[in-house]
Amino acid sequence: MVKSKRGFPTHLLVFLGPAVFIYTVFMIYPLLDSLWLSLSNKGSAGSQIFVGIQNYLTLFSQERWSAPFWNALRNNVVFFVIHMVVQNPIGLLLAALLARRMRGSAIYRTIIFTPTILSVVIVGFVWKLILLPSWGISRALFGLIGLSSLGDYPWLGTESTTLVTLSLISVWQNVGIPMMLFLAALIRIPDDLMEAARVDGASGWKIFWKIQFPLVLPTVGLIAVLTFVGNFNAFELIYVTQGALAGPNFASDILGTFFFRTFFGYQLQPADPFMGSTVAGVMLVIILIGVLVYLFGWQRRLQQIQF
Amino acid sequence: MREKVRPKFWPAIATHALLIAYAVVALFPVFLIILNSFKDRMTIFGAPFALPWGDTFTLDGYATLGSSAHFEWYFLNSLIVTTSSLLLILIVGSMAAFALAEYKFRFNLLTSLYLSIGIMVPIRLGTVGILRLMVNLHLVNSLWALILIYTAQGIPLAIFILTAFMRQVPRDLKDAARIDGASEYRIYLLILPLVRPAIGSVLAISMLPIWNDLWFPLILAPGEATKTLILGAQAFLGEFANDYNAVLSALTLAILPPVFLYVIFSRQLIRGITAGAVK
């Protein structure tokens, strides 16, 4: 590194200025403004007054707000758990298969990653069509495993199944991301290590659990936190397939859709920037907790094991 | 050496079988939509898995599309927003990355930390503030609103990746240029071509979230003149929900360009994703 020349470091300002300016004005300032709004409300004369944590108390305890809020939070947790137990293990399995470097691996990788590049809007509509009982596609697909009657079931239109169905659609789309990250980690493992184990007579299964899996553990943490942030910030898939009301009867409502309805208003519900900011504030805290647990819990513990 | 690592015959067959099975799961829904977009209404429902052939082949859906929505405008809007944002991200991001990688100054670490907040905190959470700001700046329903937000969103990760790469450029090269009397700006321009792979990575990972976004177009620029392709498609699909030919054609048109680009650039994209993740 070069010590800056004496005098006013003009070039430093020129280089850093534009990025810091745009980032501060269009990202940090709105975030802070939003947090400030969450501590304010409309005064008697329509002016903005400071109300402290009143909005948060309202959100957590007043039936009109708390019922939909806890419902959305609970659904969001289910959404996240399904990603963790379905998407990430499948991603790891696919990566382990691809890491065997067989002929055609690059083609498989490209194909399996394709859904991930598509817009959620497209993915949502595609699956909505496929699951539509009147089209008969899902009947034919379930017929392949001898359960064609399940194909007539309105998976998206039933309260008890809609959230799981949407989670699985999201898993189908996003499985490429953990797959790629696991694959990158697996490829970094030196061939010699694997070869030595194989010479010693270790099976593929044993090599995976004793060598590969421990070495990709740091990636597991990274994928978990990326999944967490992505899921608690999700919106599009629900909005596109079920509308802003996240039907049927709010069974698929998650924090993203709840946030949207609150600050933007929808049908009979008027837009409320103060309560909207409050919902965003809670989402921010949830996401920060996830990130901090990753940084200070997972990564630090991993370092202790390694050294 | 690599030959030896290859698995034996039966495990290899099993691996291929599993990968093929999953590849089918990944592509089948997309394939089904494209296939049926070329068939008439009767055959879409009567024989959804059949190929379009003879009488059953039709372009009705595409005709509806052409006559009832301005997809060419939407496409142009998306193109303007995406390329402008990417260009801005690259220019201001690489300049900041150069300063952070090159100079030792009092607030270097602090600036890096400040910028890295944006990697983990989603910009969406500030939407109420963003909407207020855009209303005050009279930028609602303008493409500028989207361009500025996407630039702010993309800057943190771009700086993060570019700084890491710029630190690896050999010292000697820059010092030699300084001895020759090159200005700091000249040295920045000299370094830029040397981090081309990093620039490719930044482009690849920044592009998709911008092109595919629905949230900000819906909130900041829902007007007919500023609709992006994704928002336009969403509105069209909602409106024509019962016209299957039109819906399937719209989906096909929305699927093909990104898939086409992806097939060409998949190597860069994959490298970009892994570069962004590996610290």
Image (spheres, grey):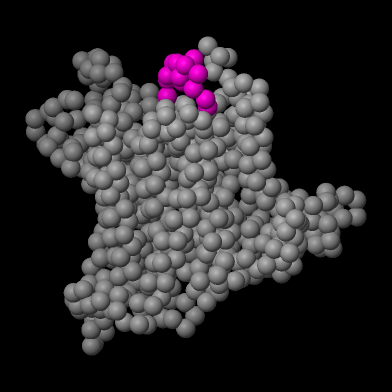
Q: Main secondary structure of the magenta part?
A: helix
Q: Is residue A75 left or right of residue A29?
A: right
Q: Residue at position x 23%, y 84% from top?
A: A43
Q: Residue at position x 35%, y 77% from top?
A: A66
From the viewer's perspective, is residue B13 above or below residue A158?
A: above
User: Which residues are the magenta region?
Assistant: A189-204
Q: Residue at position x 45%, y 37% from top?
A: A181
- Identity of the residue furthest to the top in this view: B1
From the viewer's perspective, is residue A209 above or below residue A64?
A: above
Quadrant in the rendering for residue B72: bottom right
- Identity of the residue furthest to the bottom in this view: A44
Q: Is residue A26 left or right of residue A204?
A: left
From the viewer's perspective, is residue A20 above or below residue A41?
A: above
Front-most of A21 and B15?
B15
Q: Percent position (x, y) of residue B221?
A: 47, 63
Front-most of A51 and B223?
A51
From the viewer's perspective, is residue B56 above or below residue A257?
A: above
Q: Quadrant of the C terminus of chain B?
A: top left
Residue A191: within the magenta?
Answer: yes
Q: Percent position (x, y) of residue B126?
A: 33, 61
Q: Percent position (x, y) of residue A57?
A: 25, 76
Front-most of A204 and A301?
A204
- Identity of the residue furthest to the front in this view: A201
Residue B265 visible in this rendered orientation of the protein: no
Q: Residue at position x 61%, y 70% from top?
A: A157
State the count of labels: 0
